[in-house]
Amino acid sequence: MLSLIRAVIGRDLRLAMRRQADIVAATFFFIIVVSLFPLGVGPEPEQLRRMAPGVLWVAALLATMLSLPRLFADDHRDGTLEQLALAPQPLALIVLGKVIAHWLFAGLPLVLLAPVLGIQFDLAEDALAVLTLSLLIGTPALSGIGAIGAALTLGVRGGGVLLSLLVLPLYIPVLIFGAGAVDATVTGLGAQAHLSLLGALALGGVFFAPWPTAAALRVALE
Amino acid sequence: MLSLIRAVIGRDLRLAMRRQADIVAATFFFIIVVSLFPLGVGPEPEQLRRMAPGVLWVAALLATMLSLPRLFADDHRDGTLEQLALAPQPLALIVLGKVIAHWLFAGLPLVLLAPVLGIQFDLAEDALAVLTLSLLIGTPALSGIGAIGAALTLGVRGGGVLLSLLVLPLYIPVLIFGAGAVDATVTGLGAQAHLSLLGALALGGVFFAPWPTAAALRVALE
Amino acid sequence: MIHWNSLAEFLAMGRHGPYVWGSLLVMVLLMVAEPMLLLRGRSRLIARLRRQHRAEAAERGQARAGDRSMANWSND
Amino acid sequence: MSNRLINWFRYASPQSFYPLAGRMIPWFWGLAAIFGVAGLGIGFLLAPSDAQQGEGYRIIFLHVPASWMSMFIYLVMAFWAATGLAFNTRLSGMMASALAPTGALFAFLSLWTGALWGKPMWGTWWVWDARLTSELILLFLYIGFIALQAAIDDPRRADRAGAILALVGVVNIPIIYFSVQWWNTLHQGASVSLTKAPSMAAMMLWGMLLCALACWMYSIAVALMRVRVIMLERERHTDWVRALLRGKE
Amino acid sequence: MLEASNLECVRGERRLFAGVSFRLAAGEMLALQGRNGSGKTSLLRMLCGLTPAASGEIRWCGRPIARLGEEFRSALCFLGHQNAIKEELTPLENLLATARLAQEALDEEAALAALELVGLLGREDLACRYLSQGQKRRAALARLVHEKRALWVLDEPYVALDRAAIDLVAGLVGAHLQRGGLAVLTTHQAVAVSAGSVRELTLGDDAASQQRL
Amino acid sequence: MLEASNLECVRGERRLFAGVSFRLAAGEMLALQGRNGSGKTSLLRMLCGLTPAASGEIRWCGRPIARLGEEFRSALCFLGHQNAIKEELTPLENLLATARLAQEALDEEAALAALELVGLLGREDLACRYLSQGQKRRAALARLVHEKRALWVLDEPYVALDRAAIDLVAGLVGAHLQRGGLAVLTTHQAVAVSAGSVRELTLGDDAASQQRL
Ligand code: HEM
Ligand SMILES: Nc1ncnc2c1ncn2[C@@H]1O[C@H](COP(=O)(O)OP(=O)(O)OP(=O)(O)O)[C@@H](O)[C@H]1O
Ligand SMILES: Nc1ncnc2c1ncn2[C@@H]1O[C@H](COP(=O)(O)OP(=O)(O)OP(=O)(O)O)[C@@H](O)[C@H]1O
Ligand SMILES: [Mg+2]
Ligand SMILES: [Mg+2]
């Protein structure tokens, strides 16, 4: 069982490496969106500092979301998904592997980059730490929940944009607790409560989401 | 010549209609992104009002960008693009048709929706008017410039995200003048200058961009 | 019994007329429009289905006639 | 016991549900009209004005029923979706798709009436308050459901995909509601807060309840009408639809 | 072993076929025939359990496949119209990844041998995207070389292949049958399989049997 | 009319072929042969001007096609491995859209007649996504029915088709040659074309001729 998950992760990571663009560009999308805001809003530091948690989290959310359509689409188009569905093991396990792989190349880089970008917004050190921590806890939830949307819109034409419609409402709690944790730190309240709730969401997202995802994939293949 | 452009627009619009999701969902992506920001940043009206022009413009830019990868990708995958490249007419004209069609279903709805969303941010009436006007002038530029990026990343795996990497820097002037126009209205300065510059960008984007786009498409087909 | 003294007062709603009537109007309008649209959709659907069924019946009749002629009027 | 079960399944088949629904619709329309006239009559003609809000508060007779219905319909929709997934009955999927547009309509009406109420009361059309925000997201969930079903043209696939989405959404709604509430209260006090109507006069309460009942009946009637249309469309090749349409000529 | 009774397939508003029954024992192959659009691919997907049948039942070793689930899938090897290879990966990587996902032990040497057999030696380190149409198909078919599962379901395996490759694949199928395997196969090209007994099944010829519902 | 001299094709680090020359007059067909990966598709794409040749020249009516540009393209009809149909559109819409983009007058009636000929009548209003593999190919090939341009370049047109459809396409090509058209065609299936004279060209047999650079 573990070996299966490892095989899936290995394959997906190798594909991502091979495509390169995937890893580099999802990250750069994050960077660019975050850098766009000061351009659109104006340069006052006070205002920027107050926007920072929200902007960084929204950007992380959008960056994750942008890489979602490809989560299953390539496998679907070239017939690999049928092979996976016909594998003897439960499809949900394979999905779990793919979710982990997705996080490794779409979520993790954002976590690593967040402190650097936070500096652009003049965030204090403790806020930077909480920002990074909140992203570390929250991004797996984004990958897990996103997988449901990706599976539901699979093979549906216009799926890419429909996907965001389905997934964004589901992302909102993650966004609120994530940005809330940083905000709470900035305003001096503790981030504890937000972070635990975020952790609960992440656990749910990673371990509960593969089941509806697998069901949706089977529907898509019918 | 005009009949060719019209044929391209007609076909692309028909495809968009058929997919439905495309039209509705690009628009809803805009709505949702705009609605996410308050959730990330917090509910204070004063702060929201000052963020509004930037947020709306960035969201418009992202929404346009999200629909870009499909601009040529479908035609590429199923071989239609080769057919278009082998058509006797200059490829740039065909591209122009596709750009116009793209604006009609990805840009125009944003323009129409902007005033409603502006209300969520508590914008004043004159600011709403300028916001809508700036989007009306600016979104064609987004479609035109985006086409270059879409063509350059065509067939490149991981193109979707790479695309945003290429296109966003080119979008920055549009963003600055667009959001600047609204900002100028809010702060009492005239929006005139910003709007004229935006107009110049739009003309350039629509009538100049098809040429490099066509060249990039030929390269992608080699 | 009735709370209002005059029609004008009723319509003004204590300076909140546009808001109150705007709400009521849109709500009633949409709640009337929805069943109307449904009824129209339904009658169109029925007309379309009737047309389809008739066309199919005609097709089938022809097909059966063809079968018979080929089968030399064998049983059935 | 088993008898009742069989009865249940008989009505769960479109063929027998269709005429049954047809017979029930006029009754629900009638009830909706009666409750509506009574509720609006009490609310707009008889009820006294509110001490704090003056006459503007009368929007409550529209706003609260619409808000309630929008949330309740989502629950019912998710219930049908779940039964559809579990027992693979055709009727369930049809009911879920029939309810969604009405639910979306009420969600929109809740936003609309709320916004029109907010302008005179709070001085703004919109604030990012927990309830308002979750209502907005509820509208998005409805639209997502409708868009997903519209994008899949095999009805069986559309039903199942929609059902999965509805179930995931129903888990999410309480999470959203509480998360938004947290978000709001943990910030420095919001500049405006939802002023709850103080202990309501009995008259107001009656008006509101009657209006809510009217919306309830309306929803049932419209959902039944829509499910009948969906049945005709989906079962157009079955003998009973053919017979039905022929009979009507 | 594999038994189908009274299968019916409905697609949209069209009944593609009904009353399709057959029984396949070890060492036997079913050659599905029928014109374009007669429902061959649909039938194969039903046999794999990917699409549910409108009515009828499919049994494997006497038990309905819907009930068997994983047990059935672990005896099944399906190859569809699509190649199920990743364009970014090389043929070698593709072959190894497929085996790993199917939880089969396949070492690099065996994989290279398989690639040599299908004539991709010299291309094993080239991303599949650069391969020609026929070479892609060969890369997909390379899995069959070491495939030991009992039931092979192949949808037009010969498409895009040249004569030499077609003979090779026919040989692989023949050897599989001789080992006591089962195969279900569609093709528009008449290709003889060397060993095993072949049953033929022709799906309804055109509009006559394909009723609109 | 069409003349190629000394064409060389290099892909990555591999010379697929070199010194390929031929000349095709009106009413003649070139049947390209060669095993998988020998460079047939690459040669066809060169002939269309989609890929530049490593060396050598292609002429149309005596002038290099690179120089001719639009003039050449308006005499060319290319059909590749890909079908170039939109999965969302129906066969009818696809056919009409293709004609409109090629600025050819094709009314609905003629289009329907073409679809009837390729056996898609009854499917003309079904989105192509639902068609079977062979039906998709038929939908793509339907353009040939009313195609009047002089040079047809077809890459394995017979793939996925059943016998009846193959004969039909062969007939279309034959009629085209009889009208004085030219055709270049690859296929792995031996299919006789009724009319016109056929030249054969076999691309380098395997590794021997395909040198690593
Ligand atoms: C767009 C704006 C608004 C939205 C989306 C909205 C949404 C909702 C929702 C979902 C409910 C039912 C939830 C519950 O009962 O707990 C509700 C109830 C209610 N709303 Fe609003 N509302 C809005 C604006 C307003 C305004 C401006 C007022 C008054 C000044 C108001 C007063 C009430 C009252 C009194 C209730 C009933 C409370 C209860 O029964 O517990 N709402 N609203
Ligand atoms: N929604 C639908 N409505 C009507 N017909 C449909 C629908 N979906 C699929 N079909 C038909 O179902 C058939 C599917 O056939 P299938 O792909 O199984 O054919 P096949 O025998 O594999 O053909 P080929 O030899 O071309 O691969 C096609 O005839 C197609 O037109
Ligand atoms: N970058 C590269 N490096 C090495 N070889 C390459 C590269 N790109 C393509 N090739 C080789 O070039 C050839 C392309 O062949 P082409 O597609 O023209 O073949 P074909 O004759 O059409 O074959 P088929 O019958 O399979 O369609 C293949 O052998 C492929 O392996
Ligand atoms: Mg098939
Ligand atoms: Mg080829």
Image: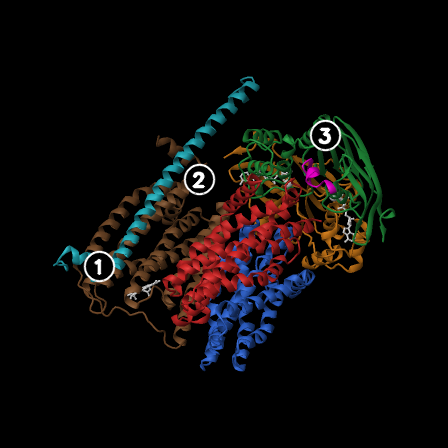
Chain colours: A blue, B red, C cyan, D brown, E orange, F green
Say which of marks 2 and 3 sits in front.
3
Q: Is mark 3 within 8 Å of ligand 5?
A: no
Q: Which residues are magenta?
A: F67-79
State which chain disc 2 sits on: D
Horizontal side of residue C40 vs F93, given as left or right: left
Residue that label 2 marks: D235
Q: Residue at the spot x=34%, y=63% of the render?
A: D125
Residue B34 in view, yes or no: yes
Q: Earlier in the sequence, mark 1 or mark 2?
A: 1
Q: Amino acid at mark 3?
A: Gly
Q: For residue D195, what is the image quadrant? A: bottom left
Q: Residue at the spot x=76%, y=53% of the render?
A: E146
Q: Amino acid at mark 1?
A: Gly
Image: F117 above or below A60: above
The x and y percentages for residue C14 are 20, 62
Q: Quadrant of the N terminus of chain B?
A: top right
Residue F71 lies in the magenta-colored region: yes
